[in-house]
Every structure is written in C-alpha cells, then in structure tokens.
Amino acid sequence: MDGQTYTGNLEGYNPENMSVCLVDARDEKGKAIPRIFLSGNVVAQIIATEKPFNIKGLADRLEKVFPRMVKLYDDVGVIVVMDRIRLNSGGIIEGAGPMAERVQRVYDEFMRETRV
C-alpha cells in the first residue's frame, strides 16, 4: 500500500487477515532480507512468478504405476508410496532399493514432461 515491493518465496500466510511471510526476500533496491512478515492490511498485490508444483498430478501418475499404494499428504506436500518411500517436489526424501528407483524414474519422467 505504501509503494514498496518485495520479492521472495512464500513461506506461509494467514487466511484470516492475509498477512504473509516471505523468505529469501529482496526489496526493490535489491537488499536481501532473510525473512519478512507483511501485515495483510499493507499488502496491495501478490503475484506468483512460478507455477506451483503439481503434487497431485505426480501422485496420480504414481497411482497408475503403484495402484492403491500411494498416499498424498497435500497439506505438507509429501507423497508416500508403499508406506516406506517418501517424496516431495524435490524427489525422494526417504527410501531405497529397486522400488525407490522405480519411483525416482516416474518422478524424473513427470518432471521432464511438466517442464516442457
């Protein structure tokens, strides 16, 4: 509202008053700010510069390969396959072995297709 602009990664927001927290932020002069909280009453506009990761799409793809063995925890952005392989938007975070390698191949294929 006062004309200042901040660019950063959205860490979280309060839906009640639309306050936001940005991490790895920069102001319009380029000054680095590790974390900034902005009250909802001063935020005039929020613009997404990247398309969010489609975790549901990845879970659906994994479900085709591993029927009834995929659980999506959308609130935390985690997919669990066979109750022992965990992955998120960055890839596998827990699990090893041949099944984890298959999950990684599905993830890699999904990433190649969605970046086109």
Image: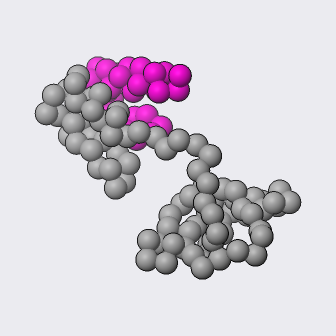
Expressed as whole percent of the image width and height from the top left, the position of residue 28 reads 81, 60
- Residue drawn 27% across and 40% down? 80
Of 105 and 14, which appears nearest the observer? 14
Of 94 and 51, which appears nearest the observer? 51
Q: Can residue 73 be seen in the rendering of this structure?
A: yes
Q: Quadrant of residue 83?
A: top left
What's the magenta region?
87-116
Residue located farthest toward the left when viewing the structure as drawn: 68
Colouring method of the image: one colour
When the figure is inspected, residue 56 is found, relative to residue 66, above or below; the finding is below
- Residue drawn 38% across and 20% down? 105
When the figure is inspected, residue 96 is found, relative to residue 36, above or below; the finding is above
Q: Is residue 89 magenta?
A: yes
What secondary structure predominates along the stretch shown in magenta? helix
Expressed as whole percent of the image width and height from the top left, the position of residue 30 reads 83, 56
Q: Is residue 7 magenta?
A: no
Q: Quadrant of residue 85?
A: top left
Q: Quadrant of residue 40?
A: bottom right
Expressed as whole percent of the image width and height from the top left, the position of residue 77 reads 38, 48
When the figure is inspected, residue 19 is found, relative to residue 53, above or below; the finding is below
- Residue drawn 27% across and 29% down? 62
- Residue drawn 22% across and 24% down? 64
Expressed as whole percent of the image width and height from the top left, the position of residue 81 reads 24, 35
